[in-house]
Image (cartoon, rainbow, N blue to C red):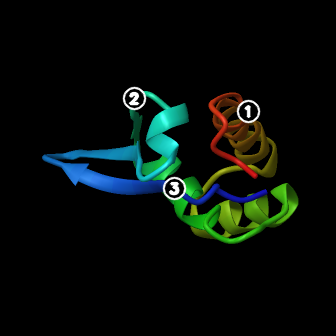
Amino acid sequence: MKIKAGFVLRKVGEKVLVVPIGDRTKTFNGMIILNDMAKFFWDNLQENIELDDLVKIVCDNFEVSEEVAKADLIEFTEKLEKAGILE
């Protein structure tokens, strides 16, 4: 899985936002606010990566169990898929 082209991160004040650019503005209305963990997930989804590999990266960088990391990633990626942001 990977973030589709046409989405960028912008920092506005203390908030990190995902906004569409170019042709994506025709099909995606709005923006998404990311917390620190969601931004970490987003950054690692810039290149094609498998869920299990991303779970390992999260566990290597944060004190979190594999089960919690996987559940959080599944929830996050499902939201991105519903919004049409993942390839």
Up the image or down, 7 lies above or below 48; here it is above
Residue designated by label 1: 78
> What is the C-alpha distance between the residues marked 1 and 2?
18 Å
Describe residue 26's horizontal placement relative to residue 86 as left or right.
left
Callout 3–callout 1 Cβ contact below 8 Å: no
Q: Residue at x 67, y 37 (%)?
A: 84
Q: Residues within 10 Å of mark 2 (few under 14, many from 20)?
A: few
Callout 3–callout 2 Cβ contact below 8 Å: no
The mark lying in front, picked from 3 and 1, is: 3
> What is the C-alpha distance between the residues marked 3 and 2?
13 Å
Sequence order check, earlier mark of 3 and 1: 3
Q: Disc 3 residue type?
A: Gly
Say which quadrant the N terminus sits in: bottom right
Residue 56's x, y, as percent? 77, 65
Q: Residues within 10 Å of mark 3 (few under 14, many from 20)?
A: some
Residue designated by label 2: 30
Residue designated by label 3: 6
Q: Residue at x 51, y 55 (%)?
A: 6
> What is the C-alpha distance between the residues marked 3 and 1?
19 Å
Judging depth in this view, the residue of 69 and 8 nearest the camera is 8
Q: Helix or strand or loop: what does disc 3 sit on?
A: loop
Q: Which mark is drawn over residue 69?
A: none
Residue 50's x, y, as percent? 85, 62
Q: Disc 1 residue type?
A: Glu
Residue 83's x, y, as percent? 62, 31
Describe residue 68's horizontal placement relative to residue 36 as left or right.
right
Q: Disc 2 residue type?
A: Gly
Q: Residues within 10 Å of mark 1 (few under 14, many from 20)?
A: some
Q: Helix or strand or loop: what does disc 1 sit on?
A: helix
Describe residue 38's horizontal placement relative to residue 14 as left or right.
right
Up the image or down, 74 lies above or below 37; here it is above
